[in-house]
């Protein structure tokens, strides 16, 4: 049962760009509040958690997150902590140490017994849509789409803020969702997928630039000019790119250049149209066909603006007619706080899944 004495919840977001901690009121849902409750207090570090033989190193994460959490709870005037959600990139495959050590460590530190461990895609979903049914496409260096049909509440509703779900099977016989749950598409890395993501767009733009350098069909002189402005002489690009351990990030760094050229360069515009098709295909693969479904777009790639968002919205309208496309309400830290608040109130309707969302 919910702890009536608990006033706040704790969210931790561990990703490739660092670690963030947030504290919010337990009766909130993280993110911008429609009822006027204050925004969460947050702390961040640009240093990612250490990854070792057992995956994400729990001791390293705790060494930074616990002092930050204590200070935030003090600033918030928290009288009790109702629940914690830890969202981490690689939770499914690199989360063994977190699953083994976090429950006892958090119980010892804060007396909290409600803990959710989530993949970062789940906290991105919760930050974008809360517990409503739909799909989220998270695009940055890579790209992953995640869809969900929340579990029914006791009153038959489809999770907090969702429309009633009388049957999780979609109209038209889409039996993929007969039992609710999660569906995932892509997120397989820049060698096997992440189609339409930042590294994919950047690589396509650099290929078009090299075609222009060679004099081959399909080349782009504007993209070649941007390549040389960013990386130096085109012939030297392989030597600068291939030895880098962070090749996906280097490729993705060129995606904004493709966006800047798109208005006047048909090759760059075609790259972004192809990326938009990949985004829409991923969303279509995971989105439940329910009257209340939404698709939210989240992640740094969409900050490119109209050159990408306009074709993405056109592709989504063609592939998912009647499904509302919306901006994400919040980010993965907001999602972690949303999950923690729902867990504290015994209202968590997002589906449990050993790889994506577990409650311990």
Image (tube, rainbow, N blue to C red):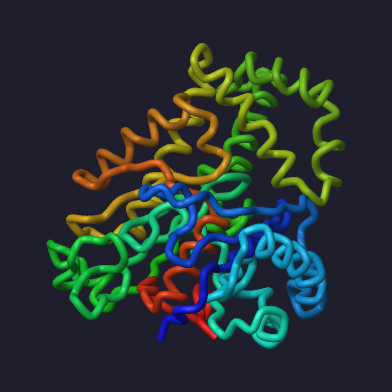
Front position in the image: 72 or 210: 72
**Is residue 92 visible in the rendered structure shown here?**
yes
Residue 17 x/y as whole percent:
71, 51
Taking depth in this image into account, of 9 and 332 the one nearest to the observer is: 9
Q: At x 36% / y 74%, what residue is drawn?
A: 347
The quarter in which the C terminus is drawn is bottom right
Residue 197 position (above or below residue 177): above
User: Residue 235: x, y in percent?
Assistant: 82, 26
Q: Quadrant of residue 230?
A: top right
**For residue 285, what is the image quadrant?**
bottom left
Please tell me how many numbered marks the rendered image carries: 0
Q: Residue at x 77, y 20 (%)?
A: 228
Image quadrant in which the N terminus is located? bottom left
Q: Which of the pair 97/346 is nearer the observer? A: 346
Specify whether 166 is left or right of 342. Answer: left
Q: Would residue 15 be seen by someone viewing this image from the given angle? A: no
> Residue drawn at (27%, 71%), measured in percent from left and top?
177
Which residue: 83% across, 22% down? 232
The outermost residue toward the top is: 264
127 lies above or below 201? below
- Asked whether, in this view, residue 65 is left or right of residue 193, the answer is right
The answer to whether 354 appears left or right of 235 in the picture is left
Q: Is residue 313 above or below residue 265?
A: below
Residue 108 position within the rendered picture, expressed as x and y whole percent measured from the top left: 71, 85
| Vertical relation: 25 (above or below) 218 | below
**Relative depth, front residue between 142 and 322:** 322
Measured from the top left, where is residue 274 in percent x and y? 45, 35
């Amino acid at each position: 049962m919910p702890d009536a004495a608990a006033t706040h919840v704790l969210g931790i977001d561990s990703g490739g760009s660092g670690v963030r901690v947030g504290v919010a009121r337990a009766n909130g849902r993280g993110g911008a509040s429609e009822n006027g409750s204050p925004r969460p207090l947050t702390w961040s570090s640009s240093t990612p958690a250490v990854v070792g033989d057992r995956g994400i190193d729990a001791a390293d994460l705790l060494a930074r997150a616990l002092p930050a959490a204590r200070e935030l709870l003090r600033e918030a005037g928290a009288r009790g902590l109702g629940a914690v959600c830890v969202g981490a990139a690689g939770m499914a495959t690199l989360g063994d140490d977190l699953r083994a050590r976090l429950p006892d460590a958090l119980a010892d530190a804060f007396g909290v017994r409600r803990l959710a461990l989530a993949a970062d895609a789940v906290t991105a979903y919760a930050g974008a849509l809360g517990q409503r049914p739909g799909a989220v496409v998270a695009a940055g260096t890579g790209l992953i789409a995640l869809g969900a049909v929340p579990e029914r509440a006791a009153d038959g509703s489809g999770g907090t803020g969702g429309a009633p779900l009388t049957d999780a099977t979609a109209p038209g016989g889409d039996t993929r969702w007969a039992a609710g749950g999660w569906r995932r598409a892509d997120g397989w890395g820049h060698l096997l997928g992440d189609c339409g993501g930042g590294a994919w767009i950047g690589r396509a733009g650099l290929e078009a630039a090299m075609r222009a350098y060679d004099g081959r069909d399909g080349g782009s002189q504007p993209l070649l000019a941007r390549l040389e402005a960013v990386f130096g002489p085109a012939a030297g690009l392989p030597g600068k790119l291939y030895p880098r351990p962070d090749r996906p990030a280097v490729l993705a760094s060129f995606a904004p250049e493709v966006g800047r050229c798109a208005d006047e360069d048909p090759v760059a515009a075609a790259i972004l149209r192809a990326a938009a098709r990949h985004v829409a295909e991923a969303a279509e693969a995971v989105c439940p066909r329910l009257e209340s479904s939404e698709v939210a777009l989240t992640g740094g790639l969409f900050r490119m603006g109209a050159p990408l968002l306009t074709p993405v919205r056109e592709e989504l309208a063609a592939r998912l007619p009647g499904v509302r496309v919306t901006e994400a309400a919040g980010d993965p830290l907001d999602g972690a706080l949303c999950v923690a608040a729902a867990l504290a109130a015994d209202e968590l309707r997002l589906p449990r899944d050993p790889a994506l969302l577990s409650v311990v």
